[in-house]
Image (cartoon, rainbow, N blue to C red):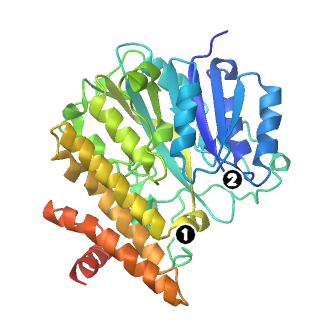
């Protein structure tokens, strides 16, 4: 039987998380037999390859590819996955995140009925510290703790998106007030008097800022679901101001191949470049504004350790590529829309980076100074576009970097 969707997963040293991601695929309501799973290992040195082997031996539609040398970022593994994909539609999943049970079925039904190049929904943030995930996984048939012995199971806690984490005063996130939202089904505002806009939709991908003048259209294939159907991105430019969330999207493979859309390699944030190019070139787009596709697990320790000078250089390089894409399409004005999200994201990460060196060595001081210079160039471009941070803490950092 031919599969319907190819799911591409790049992995590197994810032995603590990969089972959760793969099990979320196995439990898809569309049926695992309808999915082709392509796992590209970027030279893992932990137990990840053995875990992958167990799954590929059990499921014929699970394929593993092992790179000969570490590429450093997810771009190359994802590109290889696209080359190996045999299905008409492609999805992506990061190895430390997981799908909702009906993610593949809903996205497939959305994109396969009509001339659509790209369809996507939204996602939820789950805050995880020291590799902790909830004991009863939502939509994963309440996976027992013993199946994941490396995880210290704790009840799931929902938190605000990363852009709002800039209120924290410690890179260890300990001083940030964790506001648990145990029930997101339109929680009454009076229950959380300090939280403005408590209905569920404000916590799910809350950085999405869709133009309210755009009318959501009902799609007959998705009853009781609000859909935004577009001929092209010009009909909803504000979609460029959201997190790329590559794992919340489904793409028509023919569209990707014919338009030569690929992930830049050797830099972080290559998914942003890929998604922006896809949005610019897509002739049919559907956005499901109230459908949660995936759960994005935010791990404080992982983020902190990955922030270094090379990361920020790569960050700025990806923004240059995105600016060039807009320019090539005669849409330079879109860069300001895109940066309305990126600016606060960059500053919040740079804040974490700068404050991560408590006992600075000479090398770290040099590293930070070099990174500031790269960040300053991007901020100068934002200033030129008359774009300012939305967050007060970020505004202070923005002015500080520009005026030094």
Is residue 184 visible in this depiction of the protein?
no
According to the image, label 2 marks what residue? Answer: 134
Which residue is painted at 57% across and 17% down in the image? 4
Position in image of residue 402 (x %, y %): 23, 77
Position in image of residue 103 (x %, y %): 55, 31
Which residue is painted at 39% across and 49% down in the image? 243
Which residue is painted at 73% across and 36% down in the image? 141
Which residue is painted at 29% across and 74% down in the image? 392
Q: Nearer the viewer, residue 141 or 352?
A: 352
Residue at the right extreme, as displayed: 146
Q: Specify the quadrant that holds the N terminus.
A: top right
Corner quadrant of residue 327? top left
How far apart are the alpha carbons under marks 1 and 2? Answer: 22 Å
Q: In the rendered view, tell whether residue 80 sits above or below residue 124.
A: above
What secondary structure is found at the residue carrying circle 1? helix
Q: Nearer the viewer, residue 65 or 304?
A: 65
């Amino acid at each position: 039987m031919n599969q319907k969707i190819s799911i591409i997963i790049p992995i590197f040293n994810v032995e603590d998380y990969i089972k959760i991601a793969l099990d979320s695929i196995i439990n898809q309501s569309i049926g695992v037999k309808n999915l082709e799973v392509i796992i590209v290992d970027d030279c893992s040195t932990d137990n990840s390859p053995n875990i992958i082997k167990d799954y590929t031996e059990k499921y014929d539609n699970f394929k593993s590819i092992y790179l000969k040398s570490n590429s450093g970022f997810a771009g190359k593994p994802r590109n290889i996955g696209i080359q190996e994909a045999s299905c008409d539609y492609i999805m992506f999943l990061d190895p430390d995140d997981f799908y909702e049970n009906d993610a593949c079925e809903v996205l497939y039904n959305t994109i396969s009925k009509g001339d659509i190049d790209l369809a996507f929904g939204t996602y939820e943030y789950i805050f995880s510290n020291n590799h902790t995930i909830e004991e009863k996984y939502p939509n994963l048939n309440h996976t027992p703790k013993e199946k994941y012995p490396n995880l210290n199971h704790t009840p799931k806690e929902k938190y605000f998106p990363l852009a709002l984490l800039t209120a924290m005063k410690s890179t260890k996130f300990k001083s940030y007030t964790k506001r648990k939202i145990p029930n997101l089904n339109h929680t009454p505002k009076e229950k959380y008097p300090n939280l403005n806009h408590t209905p569920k939709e404000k916590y799910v991908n809350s950085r999405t800022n869709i133009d309210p003048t755009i009318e959501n259209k009902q799609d007959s294939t998705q009853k009781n679901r609000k859909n935004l159907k577009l001929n092209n991105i010009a009909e909803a430019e504000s979609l460029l101001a959201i997190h790329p969330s590559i794992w919340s999207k489904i793409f028509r493979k023919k569209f990707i191949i014919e338009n030569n859309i690929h992930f830049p390699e050797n830099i972080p944030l290559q998914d942003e470049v890929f998604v922006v190019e896809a949005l610019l070139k897509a002739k049919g787009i559907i956005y499901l504004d109230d459908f949660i596709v995936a759960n994005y697990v935010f791990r404080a320790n992982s983020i902190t350790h990955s922030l270094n000078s090379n990361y920020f250089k790569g960050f700025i390089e990806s923004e240059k590529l995105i600016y060039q894409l807009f320019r090539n399409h005669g849409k330079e004005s879109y860069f300001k829309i895109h940066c309305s999200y990126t600016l606060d994201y960059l500053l919040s990460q740079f804040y974490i980076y700068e404050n991560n060196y408590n006992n600075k060595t000479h090398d770290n001081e040099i590293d930070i100074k070099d990174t500031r210079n790269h960040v300053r160039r991007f901020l100068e471009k934002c200033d030129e576009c008359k774009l300012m941070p939305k967050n007060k803490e970020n505004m202070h950092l923005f002015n500080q970097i520009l005026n030094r």
